Image: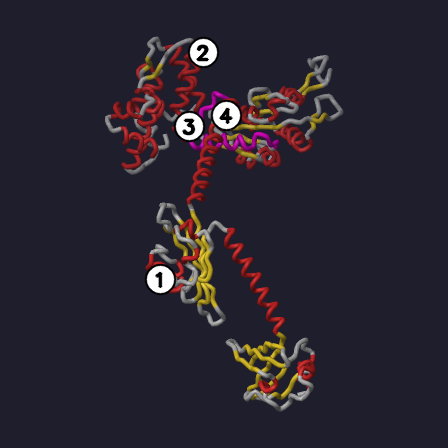
């Protein structure tokens, strides 16, 4: 008991403990001072002139003209039921009431600021609070809702539907979209949230209703702006591509992806290794990388074919030489291609043809950014981006000891592989149209190809790739006298190929009849798109409807 007294004496307010019958058994010093110490063993209510019991274990009592508030709680002591009372003067209650009143005012102000409807009910659905925004949503002022049950409000027509009722029925948060106004068809978004007590029962329901009309308006405007921005971006990319190199033809997805990547890496200085068969356009891509980069404004694009220069002259071409470095050398000396390409790009075509002795020197340049002329004892700094290309398998050459492994990894930082023309047939007819237009302009002619030639072009495997295609077109333009070139005008070797394998170039593997039909259908549509510039005209020529043509073109991405 002494321990209990010490504990109670530490409390900052009067406290008393009674048994189940209300007889005082112990109290702290603050309580004893209130009643002069004569309180032990007497009923607690007898110390007050009045004693009123309220809900929730709260008692209001009066003594000596003062009003007290007693908060009661059960207390277990020695297996017997006891009660403990905390005593405070009514002044504290008054201050608490003022605080509650202030909070109520703040809540009302916050609710009125919102443009959303805020609707609060008790556990029975009776409206406790609602802000003025409800008049905008329903046409009725807030006073029509306060203290009314939402069921009655729905029956009377003041509410079209009630999210509160759904929350009370399902005992969970409810989201709902509906038209809550009698005067407009605007969409509203409502969310009802239950507030639970300690027993897990719903104590209150808070509903928020928002008008989605303005949000939808802004969303649509933003979506339109994004679509317009994407359109402008695509147009700018096309314009930039044309500005950099108007001769580049990109129709197949693989080539578009390659040049998109080239655009991204144009302004980095990492070495690029372009791989692909002879004639696929490795030098075109290398020039594009140069023209799309800031180096095009500071330095030159220098190209050298490593397989076209004798090995004993290649070193002096690349690195230059000092006066009198060797017999026959110029008295003034000569700068190498690395020096000429300073701040620009050096393109080493057919880099797989470099002799091993020069591979060592090239590796040193890549590592140290320095070159040394033949006959010189002093290195010279160079700022050159290196682009290399080859049609050979450098990995296999490394295994055979024909190419240095360390140089291979130095060159292979950004590899780009260009597929052969036979693997990107979508590019064939656009390339034909581009080359034909350029050559007609160059030679002041007006030649054209009929469908049979275009069909041949789209099916031929083109082992020489773009270079072979370009050469054949130029040959036909210059040698065929008629203005319209037919398949009969093809050179003998190509006519023989056409007669011997009229379809094998289009179908290079066993496939289903449906796949074969789709390939043939796509090639015919591709030819028609190049020849006719209207879907109505294409439909007329192919004997079908315009709607079918539009659907097929979309299917084959033409």
Residue visible at 41% across and 55% down?
175
**Residue pointed to by mark 2:** 442
Residue visible at 51% across and 23% down?
284
Q: Count the marks.
A: 4
The residue lying furthest to the bottom in this view is 41
* The quadrant where residue 150 appears: bottom left
Q: Who comes first in sequence, dot 2 or dot 4? A: 4
Q: Tell me the CA gap for discs 3 and 2.
A: 24 Å
**Residue pointed to by mark 3:** 251
Q: Residues within 10 Å of mark 2 (few under 14, many from 20)?
A: few
Q: Is residue 12 above or below residue 307?
A: below
**Residue pointed to by mark 4:** 241
Bounds of the magenta span? 244-269
Q: Is residue 121 above or below residue 245?
A: below
Q: Who comes first in sequence, dot 2 or dot 1? A: 1
Task: Report if residue 253 lies within the magenta region.
Answer: yes
Q: Residues within 10 Å of mark 4 (few under 14, many from 20)?
A: many
Q: Are marks 2 and 1 in contact (CB under 8 Å)?
A: no
Choose mark 2 or mark 1, whichever is in front: 1
**How far from the left and from the top, in percent, is residue 523?**
33, 28
Q: Tell me the CA gap for discs 4 and 3.
A: 13 Å
* The quadrant where residue 29 appears: bottom right
Q: Are marks 3 and 2 in contact (CB under 8 Å)?
A: no
**How far from the left and from the top, in percent, is residue 187?**
39, 47
- For the C terminus, the quadrant is top left
Quick one: 347 or 216, which is closer to the camera? Answer: 216
Q: Tell me the CA gap for discs 2 and 1.
A: 88 Å
């Amino acid at each position: 008991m002494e321990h209990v007294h010490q504990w109670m004496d530490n409390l900052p307010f009067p406290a008393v403990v009674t048994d189940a019958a209300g007889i005082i058994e112990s109290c702290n010093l603050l309580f004893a001072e209130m009643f002069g110490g004569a309180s032990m063993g007497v009923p607690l209510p007898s110390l007050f002139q009045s004693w009123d019991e309220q809900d929730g274990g709260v008692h209001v009592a009066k003594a000596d003209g003062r009003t007290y508030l007693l908060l009661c709680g059960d207390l277990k002591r020695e297996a017997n039921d006891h009660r403990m009372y905390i005593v405070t003067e009514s002044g504290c209650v008054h201050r608490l009431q003022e605080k509650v009143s202030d909070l109520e005012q703040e809540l009302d102000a916050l609710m009125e600021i919102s443009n959303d409807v805020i609707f609060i009910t008790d556990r029975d659905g009776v409206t406790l609070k609602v802000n003025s925004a409800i008049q905008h949503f329903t046409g009725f002022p807030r006073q029509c809702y306060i203290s009314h049950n939402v069921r009655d409000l729905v029956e009377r027509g003041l509410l079209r539907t009630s999210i509160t009722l759904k929350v009370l029925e399902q005992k969970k948060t409810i989201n709902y979209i509906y038209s809550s106004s009698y005067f407009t068809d605007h969409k509203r978004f409502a969310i009802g949230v239950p507030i639970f007590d300690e027993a897990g029962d719903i104590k209150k329901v808070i509903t928020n209703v928002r008008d989605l009309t303005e949000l939808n308006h802004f969303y649509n405007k933003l979506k339109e702006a994004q679509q317009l921005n994407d359109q402008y971006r695509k147009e700018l990319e096309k314009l930039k591509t044309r500005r950099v190199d108007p001769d580049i033809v990109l129709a197949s997805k693989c080539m578009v992806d390659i040049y998109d990547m080239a655009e991204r890496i144009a302004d980095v200085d990492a070495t690029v290794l372009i791989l692909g068969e002879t004639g696929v356009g490795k030098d075109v891509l290398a020039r594009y990388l140069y023209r799309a980069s800031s180096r095009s404004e500071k330095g030159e694009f220098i190209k050298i074919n490593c397989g076209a220069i004798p090995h004993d002259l290649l070193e002096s071409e690349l690195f230059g030489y000092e006066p009198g470095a060797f017999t026959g050398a110029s008295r003034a000396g000569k700068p190498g291609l690395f020096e000429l390409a300073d701040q620009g790009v050096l393109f080493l075509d057919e880099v797989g043809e470099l002799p091993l002795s020069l591979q060592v020197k090239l590796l040193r340049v890549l590592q140290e950014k320095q070159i040394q002329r033949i006959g010189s004892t002093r290195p010279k700094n160079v700022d050159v981006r290196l682009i290399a290309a080859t049609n050979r398998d450098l990995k296999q050459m490394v295994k055979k000891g024909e190419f240095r492994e360390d140089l291979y990894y130095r060159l292979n930082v950004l590899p780009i592989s260009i597929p052969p023309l036979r693997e990107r047939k979508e590019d064939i007819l656009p390339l034909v149209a581009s080359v034909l237009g350029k050559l007609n302009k160059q030679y002041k002619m007006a030649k054209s190809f009929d469908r049979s030639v275009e069909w041949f072009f789209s099916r031929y495997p083109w082992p020489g790739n773009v270079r072979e295609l370009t050469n054949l077109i130029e040959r036909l333009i210059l040698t065929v006298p008629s203005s319209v070139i037919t398949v009969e005008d093809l050179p003998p070797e190509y006519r023989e190929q056409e007669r011997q394998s009229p379809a094998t170039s289009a179908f290079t593997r066993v496939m289903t009849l449906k796949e074969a039909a789709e390939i043939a259908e796509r090639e015919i549509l591709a030819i028609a798109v190049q020849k006719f510039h209207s879907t109505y005209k294409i439909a007329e020529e192919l004997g079908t409807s315009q709607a079918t043509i539009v659907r097929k073109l979309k299917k084959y991405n033409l």
